[in-house]
Amino acid sequence: MADPREEETVSAEASGFSDLSDSEFLEFLDLEDAQESNALVNMPGPSSESLGKDDKPISLQNWKRGLDILSPMERFQLKYLYVTDLASQNWCELQTAYGKELPGFLAPEKAAVLDTGASIHLARELELHDLVTVPVTTKEDAWAIKFLNILSMIPTLQSEGHIREFPVFGEVEGVLLVGVIDELHYTAKGELELTELKTRRHPMLPLEAQKKKDCFQVRLYKYIFDAMVQGKVTPASLIHHTKLCPEKPLGPSVLRHAQQGGFSVKSLGDLMELVFLSLTLSDLPVIDILKIEYIYQETATVLGTEIVAFEEKEVRGKVQHYMAYWMGHREPQGVDVEEAWKCRTCTYADICEWRKGSGVLSSAVAPQAKKAK
């Protein structure tokens, strides 16, 4: 096994396993803006068309016409979802749908905010270990990097009690979910605590609606992590969803990185076997405490923390509701009128049929939801 004192991990970005988690993505108004923006909700946008991937106008009517034929998972050719995909549904499901259909809409100022948040996350990560970049050429190589990170982090957590950027994955309601936990550490009482770092553009804590989204995200991390260490996540399920080839030989760069870490493997299947054995036989406990830490970007100071309660039945209920959209069993929903202030900072406000229809999709464009099988 790799010596924890010489631990090196591959960055999530390099391995293709990033999971956008920064609350800054949604924080572009303060409390006064939120109260004032209610009056702006019913202002019509200039157009109900937008540009698609080929820079040609996309009509919302044409977009929604095929929803009863293909599920979003099929239409967007998604093998899995990120934890933050479901968390974003907690903020506004229709915004999530527009984001998948019309990528590239991210405003420059929002991109800059995300970059700043990512820099703070990186600085935190570098406090514990070095990062190396390993070239990958196949999806098997990319997943091999995730597995190598897990294999190096598990003994480090058990011996030193603290790790950051831990990859998680598991099947939830028939869909594979993946994500990255910001931080895991043991408390003085021996409890395993998950800490999620959220950076803030302004020196103020988020609104309750934002906290609600963040809380659901960390609950979902616990739900998946606990399933991993309890042996509920299987190699067969992972292969089924990702279409990975376990027998495929790993690339030379990945093999060298594995050997440097003390792992003698030849294929992705070899690594998968080691990972699943390590997860279930290393005496990793389930997560006991969920905590969110809000950081002011400009000074990197802590604005406040939130201890999050976990109720498995509630999490399962929300996941089932959100997955019904991805599986094509219902149409996406916009925000309730009480939270219509969110529309002010939404990139898609000018083309949103939910907003123009005062809380309903236009009958001319609303799809017929697929029936649950």
Image (tube, rainbow, N blue to C red):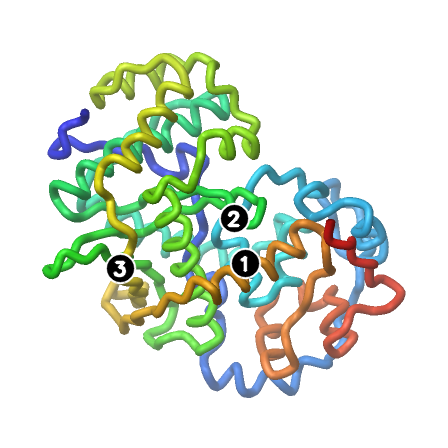
* Picture layout, residue 42 above or below residue 368: below
Crowd band around label 1 with a 10 angstrom C-alpha radius: few (<14), some (14–19), many (20+): some
Q: Residue furthest right?
A: 364
Crowd band around label 3 with a 10 angstrom C-alpha radius: few (<14), some (14–19), many (20+): some
- The location of residue 225, given as percent across then percent down, is 36, 48
Q: Which mark is residue 319?
A: 1
User: Which residue appears at 54% of the width and 87% of the height?
Assistant: 35
Q: Which mark is residue 288?
A: 3
Tell me if 119 is positioned left or right of 162 in this view.
right
Q: Quadrant of the N terminus?
A: top left
Q: Secondary structure at mark 1?
A: helix
Between the residue at mark 2 and the residue at mark 1, the CA separation in whole angstroms equals 8 Å
Tell me if 313 is positioned left or right of 89 in this view.
left
Q: Disc 2 or 1, which lies upstream in sequence?
A: 2
Amino acid type shown at disc 3: Asp
Amino acid type shown at disc 2: Val
- Nearest the eye: 190 or 85: 190
Q: Secondary structure at mark 2?
A: strand
Between the residue at mark 3 and the residue at mark 1, the CA separation in whole angstroms equals 21 Å
- The location of residue 152, given as percent across then percent down, is 24, 32
Q: Disc 3 or 1, which lies upstream in sequence?
A: 3
* Picture layout, residue 294 above or below residue 84: below
- Disc 2 vs disc 1: Cβ atoms closer than 8 Å? yes
Tell me if 298 is positioned left or right of 114 in this view.
left
User: Which residue appears at 43% of the width and 56% of the height?
Assistant: 220
The residue where tag 2 is placed is 172
Amino acid type shown at disc 1: Val
> Which of the 4 image quarters holds residue 131?
top left
- Nearest the eye: 174 or 2: 174
